[in-house]
Image (cartoon, helix red, strand yellow):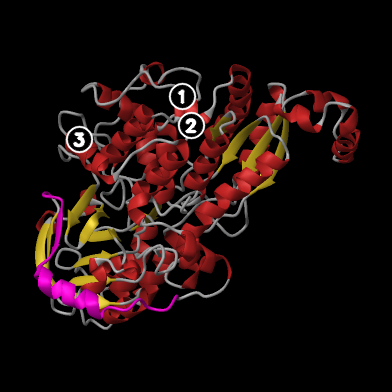
Amino acid sequence: MKSDIVKQGLEKAPHRSLFKSLGLTDQEMERPFIGIVNSYNDIVPGHINLDKIAAAVKAGVRLAGGTPFEFQTIAVCDGIAMNHIGMKYSLGSRELIADSVEIMATAHAFDALVFIPNCDKVVPGMLMAAARLNIPSIFVSGGPMLAGVSDRRAISVTQIFEGVGQAAIGKIDMQQLACLEEQACPTCGSCSGMFTANSMNCLTEAIGMALPGNGTIPAVYSERIRLAKQTGIKIMELLNKNIRPLDIMTPAAFHNAITMDMAIGCSTNSVLHLLAIADEAGVNIDLDLFNQVSERTPHLCKISPAGFHHMEDLYRAGGVQAIYNELSRRDLVDKEVLTVTGAVLGENIAATPVLDYEVIRPVDNPYNNSGGLAILFGNLAPEGAVVKKGAVDPEMMQHQGPARVFNNEEEAVAAILGQKIKSGDVVVIRYEGPQGGPGMREMLTPTSVIAGMGLDREVALITDGRFSGATRGASIGHVSPEASSGGPIALVEEGDIIQIDIPAHRLQLLVDETELANRLGRWTKPQPNIKTGYMKRYAEMVQSASRGATFRK
């Protein structure tokens, strides 16, 4: 066992003494040491139940003959961090989470790891760590929040963010907004739509690193606790068989995960995170692959914000495994890939048919014949940009309009709330990229306010920052190269005409190349927004969003 280096031999008597100070018996020290990586805290709604998940995992580990040791990582709630300086720190937390797990697992010589994430950056950060360490590992998330109910319709955090825009133009009053506050988030768990957290938990299951049900079993269901116990038992089997993350996270598994991404219309952030995880796994994927997979993958689900269904509906319809089952009818997935069940994907999905074809469309009657995400290229985004096309209204799939240029999110929000944005405009928010932000802030507030004002079918938004998975409309993010590195988005001027063609995967600035070259000659790089601490170091080390916003190696 790997843990023998801290507990076997004459020279390890001091180590054994320290373990005994923890209350360990000799019998417990003879067993494999299993690290339980928990992101529990009291501030993130998706994480306040993770103490119960961890207790169940530890029970499972002990039942199967292991000795569990729990330790924590940080976790940021993107909803609470939204539209202030805190959001600059959200994406940066992903690298810090991966690094902290590496430190703890290596310093304490764990034989295997169980990861307990739930919300946005924690899931990819832990997956990156699992790939980097490559010791037997398995994931179990805290599960999604149940949808709220308002006027007998299901709602989520999307409606409360959009309610701000509705209140700003008098469409609803403050009492109605207060009702949405009370109703939108009724339980613990990751917010109830196909936002980033639930996207990544579904993709963790899709790539084979979590047991079936991980992505969709609601947080408050006892089935989630049983899944956690099964996960604790299963890690001992993975250890005994020496099944490791890189045995599972193969090129074929990533291809499957991207296929799932397109079928269910995940958050645009999934592109950023899959690139980063693949990089840690030594798997070469690029943005072109997302479009290639999208072209042949039918869009089967429209979960909020793209539609009216929520995660609990997807759970009742059969979840990730049922979607794989449906996709397999067209041979769209590799059924021979290994998973943490110890079996291959084909065995896992054989007995999991779709239970509700209203939630998961049949593969021969999809919402669209291509996937829910699209990567756009053009002179405004030579290295690519991302849009959740499954959440774009048909009339905005192609759009041309004048640029309204803002150098940060705050300027844009003030203009939108001041009703200075008109039908046909293309809002450009720049200097919000990984380096320039720093931290590549999510733009849920401006996109939601636009939607709440009823302008999402008339106004587009383009940024080198990111979007929440709760964003809908013609919202195009991750524009690369970013403005801070002198990318073309830095050269856009007020009134320039921007052409968007999502079906053709094009994003063009209709300004001739000579004029753009002249503008670049006049351009000067702005001073950093943060000059101290972690985010200063982050800005110095981070790469382009087109490379997953990972650190330079």
Residue 96 location, quadrant: bottom right
* Residue 518 shown in magenta: yes
Residue highlighted by disc 2: 209
Residue drawn at 26 percent across, 41 percent down: 290
- What's the CA distance linking mark 1 and mark 3? 24 Å
Quick one: label 1, few (<14), some, or many (20+) residues within 10 Å?
Answer: many
Instruction: Tell which tag, 1 or 3, sits nearer the viewer.
Output: 1
Residue 178 location, quadrant: bottom left
Residue highlighted by disc 1: 339
Disc ID at residue 298: 3
Q: Return the residue nearer the eye: 553 or 547.
A: 553
SS assignment at label 1: loop
| Vertical comparison of 309 with 75: above or below | above
| Vertical comparison of 381 with 122: above or below | below
Give the residue type that dot 3 points to: Pro
| Vertical comparison of 39 with 340: above or below | below
Q: Position of residue 257 (x, y in %)?
A: 35, 35
Q: Position of residue 264 (x, y in %)?
A: 29, 40
- 186 with respect to 287 (left or right): right
- 45 with respect to 170 (left or right): right
Residue drawn at 32 percent across, 32 percent down: 255
Instruction: Tell which tag, 3 or 2, sits nearer the viewer.
Output: 2
- 83 with respect to 234 (left or right): left
Q: Are marks 3 and 2 in contact (CB under 8 Å)?
A: no
| Span highlighted in magenta in the image | 503-528
